[in-house]
Image (spheres, grey):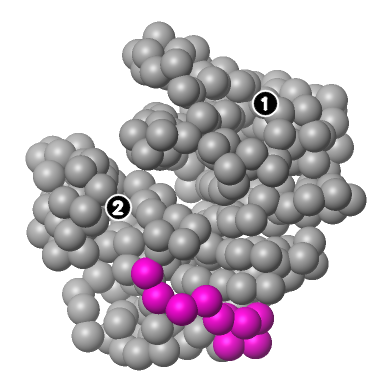
Amino acid sequence: MNKNLVFDIGTNNGDDALFYAHLGYEVIAIDADPTIIKNNTKKINDPKIQFLNCAISYNDNEILDFYIDEDDTKNSLISKNVAGNNTLKEVVKVTTRTLKSLMEERGVPYYCKIDIEGYDPVAIRSLKGINELPPFMSAEGECKPDSEKFSEDGVLDVLEAFKEVGYKKFKLVDQTTLTVLKKDDFYIKRTQLSYHLMRKLQKMTGAYSRTYTNMQRLTKEYNYPFKFAASGPFAEKLEGEWIRYEEAKALYLHHRRAFFSKEVNKPFTFWVDWHVAR
């Protein structure tokens, strides 16, 4: 394991990769969108960051369709996640790699972040058979198309995938505030802006996140301007206690049900990340 290496799977605009480089890590930043990789390579001139264009899937060297959304943060290998929103821009062909083969080739990272719009469980399971897991990983809790009705089907798939490959310790993080969640009334007590409203505010002002106390605190602590959709702190720097699988499962369902008890919240807007440790 290379303690100085981080993988950023689904790097998008490169903000997370820049944060990891800011902390001193070497970064392998991966995205399936060739335009994103081309643009990042031009605009981000940091020798600690290496950009790589490929998709993560179960097998190496397959050619898959990748669906480009009008909002590139929603690009996905899952057609309904884009087409279901009626925002499909184009479809491109992408070559696949497994995380196992990438880590055998580039080194096992200290931390691996995954955010690939619904394909996260596949990426996690593509680690099966690896001799050594990264000490820490994170992935988006779930990703459903805007058009999909409320359902609990498959909402624990990311957690299950982490458990299957060998992770035993978990933390759940609210991604609008980067708050580590506990068994409390977090989503009942606070006003939750929708994903779409926050996206509009960010585009108009570039500054909405400053209204969140936790984001202010983290910005000062890390001397880094966390932006909308930042994955935030990770590994042992993440606050709170690690919990075991059964408690993690109950915690997720508790907060998800509380979130959707507010009728204003649409299916796509429950936005949390799992952080895990071996």
Is there any visible trace of residue 100 in the rendered image?
Answer: yes
Report if residue 240 lies within the magenta region.
yes
Q: Main secondary structure of the magenta part?
A: loop
Q: Nearer the viewer, residue 163 or 58?
A: 163
Residue 232 x %, y %: 37, 52
Mark 1 residue crowding within 10 angstroms, few (<14) / some (14–19) / many (20+): many
Relative to 200, 113 lies left or right: right
User: The residue under label 2 is which amino acid type?
Assistant: His
Q: Are marks 1 and 2 in contact (CB under 8 Å)?
A: no
Residue at 41% across / 34% down in the picture? 24
Query: In the image, which residues are magenta?
Result: 239-248
Residue type beneath disc 1:
Cys
Residue 251 vs 22, above or below: the answer is below
* Residue 11: image location, x then y, percent: 49, 34
Closer to the camera in the image, 261 or 89 = 261
Comes first in the chain, label 1 or label 2: 1
Residue at 54% from the left image edge and 21% from the top image edge? 51
Residue, disc 2: 196
Q: Is residue 88 visible?
A: no
Q: For the residue labelled by badge 1, is the local secondary structure a helix, a strand or a loop? A: loop
Disc 2 element? helix
**Up-down: is 13 above or below 111?**
above
Crowding at dot 2, Cα within 10 Å, few <14 / some 14-19 / many 20+, comes out as few
Q: To which residue does mark 1 refer? A: 54
Quadrant into which the N terminus falls: top right
- Estimate the spatial distance between the alpha carbons at disc 1 and disc 2, rounded to whole Å: 28 Å
Q: Residue at x 62, y 82 (%)?
A: 244
Residue 163 inside the magenta-drawn segment: no
